[in-house]
Image (cartoon, rainbow, N blue to C red):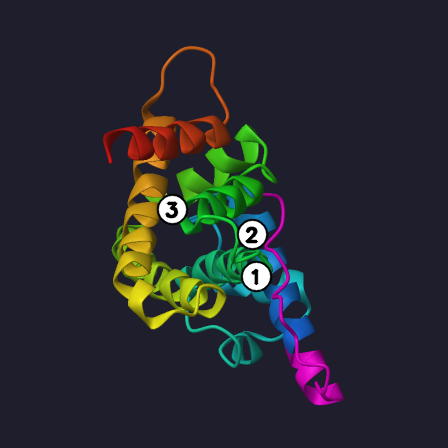
Amino acid sequence: MSEIPASSGIAPSEGLRERKRRETRQRIAEAALSLFLANGYHGTTLDDIAAAAGISRRTFFSYFKSKDDIILFGLDADSAMLIADLLKTSPDVPPLDAVRNVMVKRIERYTSEEMIAIDNLMMSSETLLVRKQAHYAEQERSLFNALCEVWRQPERRPALRMVAMVSIGAMRVALSSWREQTGPRKPAAKFLRDAFDSLRTEL
């Protein structure tokens, strides 16, 4: 992924201070990701990131606690855009189809090279891998909440919770299969579509 997505859903009433803080946070994250891809995760220091972003090391800690937090910031921003897309869905669309559509749309934004690069970054940090598991759980909660916003009937909530659970599961299986493939590489979006097709067939 060549850049970390800008956060979506910015409030119209955002003040100058909030806007500057958001832009600085984004600048730090993008500078860090460029360094990670060029020099490796462990080969990039906090001083390197601060210098590239034009801030002091002390200022860095006003925005992020660690290098791990920068990667997770990117994942959170991407998840926020996925949720924003889902909230625009018509309630006439079946929930599982809606989730599949927005997930495929998000993953299609990235080339295989970008996916490989960010995947290698994730695999290079044990602490990041552990935190990624918690990120999946948070994604599931956010997805469920968004589903309940679109399909508001209370009696559908148990089924919507299952949609959230199996959708995150399908995404994890798809990314694992994409990572383990051999020969000419197929795009991650294909694996994601196949995972949802298998899910529908088996259910």
Q: Residue reaching furthest top?
A: 183
* Front one among 37 and 167: 167
Q: Position of residue 110 (x, y in %)?
A: 58, 38
For image coordinates 69% across by 68% down, the residue present is: 54
Instruction: Give the labeled residue for mark 2.
Output: 33
Mark number for residue 49? 1
Q: Taken as a whole, is the magenta stretch helix, strand or loop?
A: loop
Q: Nearer the viewer, residue 4 or 164?
A: 164
Of tags 2 and 1, the one toward the viewer is 2
N-terminal of the two: label 3 or label 1?
A: 1
- Residue 137 spot, x, y in % from top left: 29, 60
Q: Which residue is mark 3?
A: 122
Give the quadrant of the C terminus.
top left
Q: How many marks?
A: 3
Report the Cα–Cα distance between label 2 and label 1: 9 Å
- For the record, the magenta segment spans 1-21
Q: Are marks 3 and 1 in contact (CB under 8 Å)?
A: no
Taking the spot 29% from the left edge, 28% from the top edge, the residue there is 201
Q: Position of residue 82 (x, y in %)?
A: 53, 55
In the depicted view, which residue is nearer to us: 181 or 66? Answer: 181
